[in-house]
Image (spheres, rainbow, N blue to C red):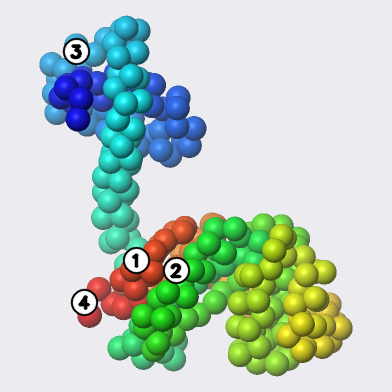
Amino acid sequence: MSTGLAVTAHWLASGCRWITKALWKPCRAASLAAVAGLAFHLSPASAEAAAPNPEFDQQVRDVLMRNPEVVSDMLALLEKRDEAANGHTDQKLIASLAYELFAGFDLEAPVLVEFLDYNCSQCRKTQLSVAALKAQAPDLRHVIIVLPVSGPSSEFTAKAALALKSLEGTEAYYEFSNAMMKVEGRATAVTAIRVLSGLGYDAEAVAAAVREGFGADELQLAESLAAALNAADTPFFVGPGGIIRGVTSANRLKAISKAANR
């Protein structure tokens, strides 16, 4: 590691200005600014010394370019801190909605509730982790809740899935959902009908059921549940042991699929 990294509080305070410009995501910029703020708080002398200095800023930039892992380390540390801070709130949310989330399930066995959108590329990536978890835990109860957040195409395919569930049952719903997550390109009415036909279901009957409002109540309940959980985007996972937002690993999914004390 470069000797320049030894000037921790000083380069963090000055370097944050450069990093926040380089990392466009506001949340990441705010987090990095918080790190710099921590450096100021821990070392007032360093804060006084960190007046704007273009030459020093360039030195900081050079250090970070040579050691990009520093930024990753900082972000990982901040993510762990955020997870710890959110953990208590998440557990309270789960407890308040446990009946709606886990009704009828024996929580001695692992349970995983997944909110997904058939047009969510991140949801498709995470299916590899879900499949790996199922291989590790054959007794896993995996619940799929469609949450169309990507516009009209997603809304139609969600309604088609729920209409199929009303007509043919839960097994058909999961079969269709799994197939839709493997479709190349966007999930649309055309691809939904093609998948339904390919699976041997009556696509015209499902389309008619969508027009008649089959599954609309269940979709409304799903959206209400997502709102209560603050699930504004997908993928979104809930288990007795916690909540995971976004793409994740099988091990992390496994960790939340059981209550924290089991």
In percent of the image, x 26 and y 28: which residue is there?
37
- Indicate the amino acid at tag 4: Asn
Q: Quadrant of residue 36?
A: top left
Question: Residue 123 at what x, y percent from top left?
Answer: 55, 63
Task: Give the Cα separation between the discs numbered 3 and 2.
Answer: 48 Å
Please state which of the two labelled residues, at mark 2 or mark 4, is closer to the viewer: 2
Q: Is residue 206 visible?
A: no
Q: In this view, does 58 lie above or below 200?
A: above
Please state which of the two labelled residues, at mark 3 or mark 1, is closer to the viewer: 1
Q: Is residue 189 above or below residue 122?
A: below
Q: Is residue 143 visible?
A: yes
In percent of the image, x 67 and y 72: which residue is there?
180
**Residue denoted by label 3:** 48
Q: Report the side of 53 relative to 215 (left or right).
A: left
Task: Give the Cα separation between the discs numbered 2 and 4.
Answer: 23 Å
* Lower sequence index among marks 4 and 3: 3
Question: Residue 61 at what x, y percent from top left?
Answer: 35, 20
How many residues crowd mark 2 within 10 Å: few (<14), some (14–19), many (20+)? some
